[in-house]
Image: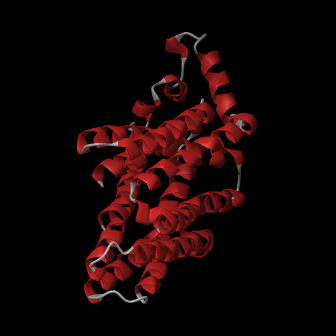
């Protein structure tokens, strides 16, 4: 089921993140990161799906937007943790990665599978009792491996488009914005614990604001134009910041705020779009292919 998958993958990446604090070489560090990736890959594939199936209509987009603000909130908390423990070294920050594991107890007690997911499994059990030749194409797809259904004639284009969109968003973040902290180190010539923490904090604030603005953008402009505007709003400020800022000043925090406002929006846009175009039987796999394929591209 999706809920148990989400719980166990959160535990996996939380424990593996904490193990990174014990690394003695880049080999064992790489092994721990592999398991972190396994956990995040599983959680990111089902987390949004579980939420999306619990909400319907326009409220779903707002629920997903609130969920997506957790990315910005995580950056805020990480920056505060770095501010308080950064001088002690990087190992302490990885140990704090255990925190998500404690949320799983609440999930275990409160969350249950969605009605649509239960109906899908009931339908699958019913179809297994029928003669295979008597099944319609749609019924056969219900019984097929969802990974195969994600690339059938009906879903192939959507899967590719969503994967490219997710890949573009992740590449922008990993290949550009994740280097902001070491770049600040270069600008200051120091470890710059306070400066890096401040930039991350302001980016998180911008990300939260941009995420909450995105459902309104979709309502006003539709998905296509919102997607175009979202990627432009991510791209231009990032390029301008890296090309024009030659020395560190607190004004860099304003850039971080503006960039965060734009850079978080494409993640939510791709999430909402994918959850609205895939059917229940392929929703989890389509989401997993989209994000994990995007991560591989990044």
Q: Is residue 257 left or right of residue 247?
A: right
Q: Residue at x 35, y 56 (%)?
A: 167
Relative depth, front residue between 15 and 288: 15
Quick check: 5 above or below 198?
above
Image quarter for residue 46? top right
Image quarter for residue 23? top left
Relative depth, front residue between 24 and 249: 24
Query: In the orientation shown, which residue stands out farthest toward the front?
Result: 88
Query: Which color mode does the image show?
Result: secondary structure
Q: How many marks?
A: 0
Quick check: 45 above or below 206?
above
Q: Is residue 122 left or right of residue 245?
A: right
Residue 283 visible within the image: no
User: Picture coordinates of residue 64 (x, y %)?
Assistant: 62, 57
Q: Is residue 228 left or right of residue 66?
A: left
User: Picture coordinates of residue 203 (x, y %)?
Assistant: 48, 74
Q: Residue at x 71, y 41 (%)?
A: 106
Quick check: 111 above or below 143?
below
Q: Quadrant of the C terminus?
A: bottom left
Q: Residue at x 35, y 70 (%)?
A: 181
Q: Quadrant of the N terminus?
A: top right
User: Picture coordinates of residue 25 (x, y %)?
Assistant: 25, 43
Relative depth, front residue between 146 and 33: 33
């Amino acid at each position: 089921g999706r809920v148990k998958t989400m719980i166990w993958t959160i535990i996996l990446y939380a424990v593996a993140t904490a193990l990174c604090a014990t690394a003695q070489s880049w080999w064992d560090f790489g092994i721990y990161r592999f398991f972190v990736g396994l956990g995040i890959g599983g959680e990111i594939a089902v987390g949004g799906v579980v939420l999306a199936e619990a909400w319907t209509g326009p409220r779903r987009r707002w629920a997903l937007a609130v969920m997506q603000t957790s990315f910005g909130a995580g950056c805020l908390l990480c920056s505060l943790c770095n501010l308080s423990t950064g001088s002690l070294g990087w190992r302490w920050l990885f140990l704090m990665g255990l925190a998500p594991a404690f949320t799983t107890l609440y999930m275990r007690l409160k969350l249950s599978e969605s009605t649509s997911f239960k109906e899908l499994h009931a339908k699958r059990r019913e179809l297994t009792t029928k003669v295979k030749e008597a099944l319609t194409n749609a019924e056969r797809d219900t019984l097929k491996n969802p990974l195969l259904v994600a690339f059938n004639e009906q879903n192939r284009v959507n899967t590719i488009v969503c994967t490219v969109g997710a890949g573009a968003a992740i590449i922008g973040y990993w290949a550009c914005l994740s280097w902001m902290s070491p770049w600040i180190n270069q600008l200051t010539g120091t470890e710059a614990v306070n400066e890096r923490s401040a930039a991350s904090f302001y980016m998180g604030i911008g990300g939260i604001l941009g995420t909450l603005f995105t459902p309104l953008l979709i309502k006003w402009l539709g998905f296509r134009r919102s997607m175009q505007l979202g990627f432009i709003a991510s791209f231009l400020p990032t390029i301008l910041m890296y090309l024009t800022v030659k020395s560190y000043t607190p004004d860099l925090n304003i850039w971080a705020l503006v960039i965060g406002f734009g850079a978080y929006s494409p993640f939510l846009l791709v999430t909402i779009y994918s959850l609205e175009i895939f059917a229940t039987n392929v929703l989890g796999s389509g989401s997993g292919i989209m994000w994990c394929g995007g991560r591989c591209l990044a």
